[in-house]
Image (tube, rainbow, N blue to C red):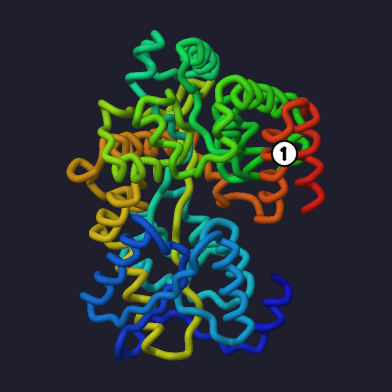
């Protein structure tokens, strides 16, 4: 980010002042949600912004997050930073270091964000103590989606709660002729499942390796054991079709009764709903296995970051947009569509939310109370992007190389991460 700091060094400092003169609130949201339920959710945000008197504009960049970041860098270097950008995790802190982000503290104080937003999100939205971003949702990563039909036919009485239970269930399911784990191999999908394994086997190891970035934890015996469990899953319980399968079709194998389990975040709920599958009949949801016996929660969150603007109309637009994003109304509508839950802990999920979302909110609070809430490495909420990328590449190499040992995988991951620090 150093070149960006140099590029913006001469930029005038404009703060996000609550009392700025109101003319015509305007915005232009840069985001990557170009299709499906994501695009519908953004469209709803635009409708609400417009209904409140704002002039809405959006710039949608399809594809990977890297495409959005490339557009953002180009705009900043050109001296035309967008007023609002969909970003998350360490990206927020990195852009905050440029000195270009707007200060939302006055609005946050007026609307009491500190007391209603999930506490694990506060250091992400406030990287140096001041609010610079507004969270849209909370995704839970460590979900196990299961087919009651496949489990029943295989003689599996309940959704497995530990990894030993999971392996025993998979042995029965494979013997029955069905796929145990529906999967599509890619860096982010492989790393999603792997971080769920690490988290479920050793909470402290997850925190040290994937939150703190401790390379010695990455090469530890505990990480070797996690890779051993993951190897069992990739070679015995995932089917060969994972190499060519589209990621968004994985959940449908569970819904159609072709696979028993799918380990993935709660956007899966949106895919299952769109596919016409019914909770309790075609699928059930449960916390992915843990060996430590408590409710646990791996958190991911989408958010909008605000950049300083010279035009008072855009400054007013930032206030209106941030306020709209954190309104209970938007948090409700957006998350009902997305499959996630509100970033606000005070939104009532008893009406209009799926039972899986209601369970997610319950487990989130229990994980906060029990000290088991963590942010996701695989979904860019903890360590810097370049370190995360090195870890993810190592995990996918392990999946693609069946003869690689767990010991070699842990060492390779630690070495790759250390090279990026």
Residue for point 30% across, 56% down: 334
Q: Could you tell me which residue is drawn at 31 percent across and 41 percent down?
A: 275
Residue 127 lies, with reference to residue 29, above or below; the image says above
Residue 142 pos. (x, y %) = 47, 35
The residue drawn where x is 54% and y is 19% is: 163
Residue 377 visible in this rendered orientation of the protein? no
Q: Is residue 272 left or right of residue 295?
A: left
User: Relative to 344, does residue 326 appear above or below in the rendering?
Assistant: below
Q: Position of residue 400 (x, y in %)?
A: 70, 35
- Left or right: 34, with 375 as reference point: left
Specify whether 277 is left or right of 240: left
Between 324 and 253, the one lying in front of the other is 253
Which image quarter: residue 365? top left
Q: Is residue 413 above or below residue 86?
A: above
Q: Is residue 48 visible?
A: yes
Residue shown at 34% from the left, 51% from the top: 338
109 relative position to 195: left or right: left
Residue 75, quarter of the rendered image: bottom right
- Furthest toward the top, the residue is 155
Q: How many marks?
A: 1
Residue 48 percent across, percent down from the top left = 25, 70
Which quarter of the rendering shows the N terminus?
A: bottom right
Q: On the image, numbered disc 1 is attached to which residue?
A: 397
Q: Secondary structure at mark 1?
A: helix
């Amino acid at each position: 980010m150093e070149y960006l700091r140099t590029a913006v060094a001469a930029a005038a400092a404009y703060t996000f002042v609550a009392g700025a003169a109101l003319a015509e609130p305007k915005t232009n949201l840069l985001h990557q949600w170009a299709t499906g339920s994501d695009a519908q959710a953004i469209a709803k945000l635009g409708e609400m912004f417009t209904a409140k008197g704002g002039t809405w504009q959006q710039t949608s960049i399809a594809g990977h997050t890297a495409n959005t970041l490339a557009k953002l860098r180009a705009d900043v270097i050109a001296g035309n930073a967008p007023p609002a950008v969909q970003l998350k995790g360490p990206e927020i802190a990195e852009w905050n270091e440029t000195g270009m982000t707007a200060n939302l503290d006055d609005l946050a104080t007026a609307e009491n964000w500190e007391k209603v937003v999930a506490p694990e999100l506060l250091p992400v939205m406030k990287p140096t103590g001041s609010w610079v971003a507004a969270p849209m949702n909370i995704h839970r990563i460590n979900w196990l989606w299961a087919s009651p039909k496949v489990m029943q036919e295989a003689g599996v009485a309940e959704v497995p709660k530990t990894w030993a239970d999971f392996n025993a269930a998979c042995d029965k399911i494979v013997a029955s002729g069905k796929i145990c784990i529906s999967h599509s191999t890619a860096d982010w999908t492989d790393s999603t499942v792997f971080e769920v394994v690490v988290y479920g086997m050793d909470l402290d190891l997850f925190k040290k390796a994937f939150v703190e970035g401790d390379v010695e934890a990455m090469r530890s015996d505990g990480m070797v054991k996690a890779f051993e469990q993951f190897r069992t899953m990739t070679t015995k319980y995932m089917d060969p079709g994972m190499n060519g399968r589209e990621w968004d079709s994985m959940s449908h194998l569970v819904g159609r009764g072709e696979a028993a389990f799918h380990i993935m975040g709660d956007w899966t709920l949106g895919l299952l709903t769109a596919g016409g599958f019914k909770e309790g009949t075609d699928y059930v949801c449960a916390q992915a296995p843990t060996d430590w016996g408590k409710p646990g929660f791996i958190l991911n969150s989408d958010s909008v970051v605000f950049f300083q603007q010279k035009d008072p109309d855009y400054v007013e637009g930032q206030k209106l947009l941030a306020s709209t994003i954190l309104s209970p109304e938007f948090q409700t509508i957006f998350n009902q569509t997305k499959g996630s839950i509100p970033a606000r802990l005070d939104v009532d999920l008893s009406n209009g939310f799926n039972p899986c979302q209601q369970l997610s909110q319950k487990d989130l609070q229990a994980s906060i109370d029990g000290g088991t809430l963590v942010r996701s490495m695989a979904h860019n909420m903890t360590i810097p992007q370049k370190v995360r990328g090195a870890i993810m590449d190592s995990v996918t190499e392990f999946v693609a190389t069946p003869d690689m040992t767990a010991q070699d995988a842990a060492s390779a991951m630690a070495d790759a991460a250390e090279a990026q620090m």
